[in-house]
């Protein structure tokens, strides 16, 4: 196989990249951006070598404990559980949460064979039972899998005597009722305040 | 910047990849497919090191001259001009062309600042003037830019006394007239046989 074909095949390991996109990417890099190709190769090598999981919150970090977990300004009584580092970043951007996090690095998905041991469930239970955490805020996604994960989490955490809350469901800010789906409106009615 | 963020930034050099896709790719590789990450890094390194342009047809190759150009079974009197190696592969798959190729590695695109010197125009004129080529088949894409490129090519080649032909425009095989665009039907009427 030529180096070009090998590159196309390798790029197909990226999620959401099929044969046509992979060919287009390989062509672009080799014809117009060899510097970019070398940059990506170096970044991949460095990330595979350096990136590990925070021993406390399970997110990606290059140290034993991540900077967020080490921050003394954070409220150690609150623990927010999210699926991915991107979800954690979304909560951080609001600027309205000052507690700590636990990142599952996935969600329960029985159809894909992802069970409790494949995501950090046991580690979460250990972490939440450190004696300092008072409330666990479950912020998994509001998808079928995220909701199922939230349910399993909540059961396990409550049985350990912890207070468990869930992000509120409701009408998104800035949206018109006419264009909001029925399930969301129904939940917003039930949770009205 | 963390190695993770550096990886996200590097992946955005890929065409068609924005911040969200890049984050998803980085997460997938580091969480689920570190072997894939290393594979891609190695393939990029090898391709940047080994892939060059064929001295005759300008396509990607790892040798001085590519295998197609070296094939003695090929008819050296016909030269098919395409924009990219993917287009060359599409013509090859038909199995109905036995001549040689020239790959422009791009198209004229004044709006993007891509002029005659940015694609292999002068090299094509040299190649087509080797004394063996009798007919140049222009197989650039049937887009505005591909047609403009074809026009400039044809002018240059004809002024050098070469016979220039263009792939036929017409109704695609298997399509219903009802669903074919007007421009295509108009061309098919003019070029009827």
Image: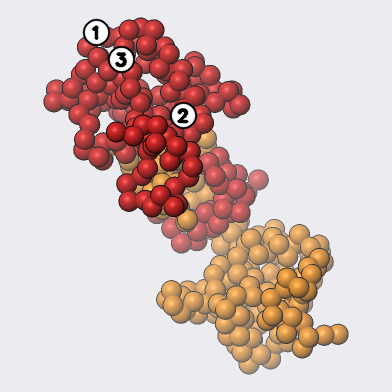
Chain colours: A orange, B red
Q: Which is more N-terminal, label 3 or label 1? A: 1
Q: In the image, residue B19 lies at what x, y percent? A: 62, 50
Q: Are marks 1 and 3 in contact (CB under 8 Å)?
A: no
Residue at numbered disc 2: B146
Q: At numbered mark 3, what does the secondary structure look like: helix, strand or loop?
A: strand
Task: Tell me: residue B77, above or below residue A18.
Answer: above
Q: Are marks 2 and 1 in contact (CB under 8 Å)?
A: no
Is residue A77 in view from this perspective? yes
Q: Nearer the viewer, mark 1 or mark 3?
A: 3
Determine the chain carrying the residue at label 3. B
Q: Is the residue marked by circle 1 packed among few (<14), some (14-19), or many (20+) residues within 10 Å?
A: few
Residue at 61% over, 26% down: B111
Q: Is the residue marked by circle 3 packed among few (<14), some (14-19), or many (20+) residues within 10 Å?
A: some
Q: In front here: B166 or B7?
A: B166
- Tell me the quadrant of the picture where the N terminus of chain B can be found: top right
How far apart are labels 1 and 3 at the CA level?
12 Å
Determine the chain carrying the residue at label 1. B
Residue at numbered disc 1: B131
How far apart are labels 3 and 2 at the CA level?
19 Å
Q: In front here: A42 or B180?
A: B180
Q: Which is more N-terminal, label 1 or label 2? A: 1
Task: Tell me: residue B34, above or below residue A157.
Answer: above
Q: At numbered mark 2, what does the secondary structure look like: helix, strand or loop?
A: helix
The numbered disc on residue B163 is 3
Task: Tell me: residue A34, above or below residue A54.
Answer: above
Residue at 43% over, 13% down: B155
Is the residue at mark 2 from the same chain as the one at mark 1?
yes
Q: In the image, residue A2 lies at what x, y percent? A: 29, 36
Q: Are marks 3 and 2 in contact (CB under 8 Å)?
A: no
């Amino acid at each position: 196989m030529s180096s070009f074909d090998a590159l196309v095949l390798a790029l197909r390991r990226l999620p959401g990249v099929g044969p046509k996109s992979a060919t287009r990417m390989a062509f672009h890099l080799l014809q117009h951006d060899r510097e970019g190709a070398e940059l990506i190769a170096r970044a991949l090598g460095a990330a595979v070598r350096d990136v590990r999981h925070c021993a406390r919150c399970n997110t990606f970090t290059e140290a034993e404990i991540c900077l967020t977990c080490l921050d003394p300004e954070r409220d150690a009584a609150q623990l927010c559980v999210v699926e991915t580092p991107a979800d954690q970043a979304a909560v951080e951007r609001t600027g309205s949460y000052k507690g700590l996090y636990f990142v599952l690095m996935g969600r329960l998905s029985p159809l894909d064979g992802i069970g409790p041991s494949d995501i950090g469930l046991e580690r979460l239970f250990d972490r939440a039972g450190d004696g300092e955490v008072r409330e666990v805020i479950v912020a998994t996604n509001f998808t079928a899998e995220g909701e199922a994960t939230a349910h399993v989490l909540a059961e396990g955490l409550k049985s350990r005597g912890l207070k468990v809350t869930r992000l509120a469901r409701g009408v998104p800010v800035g949206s018109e009722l006419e264009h909001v789906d029925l399930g969301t409106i129904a939940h917003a009615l039930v949770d009205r305040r």
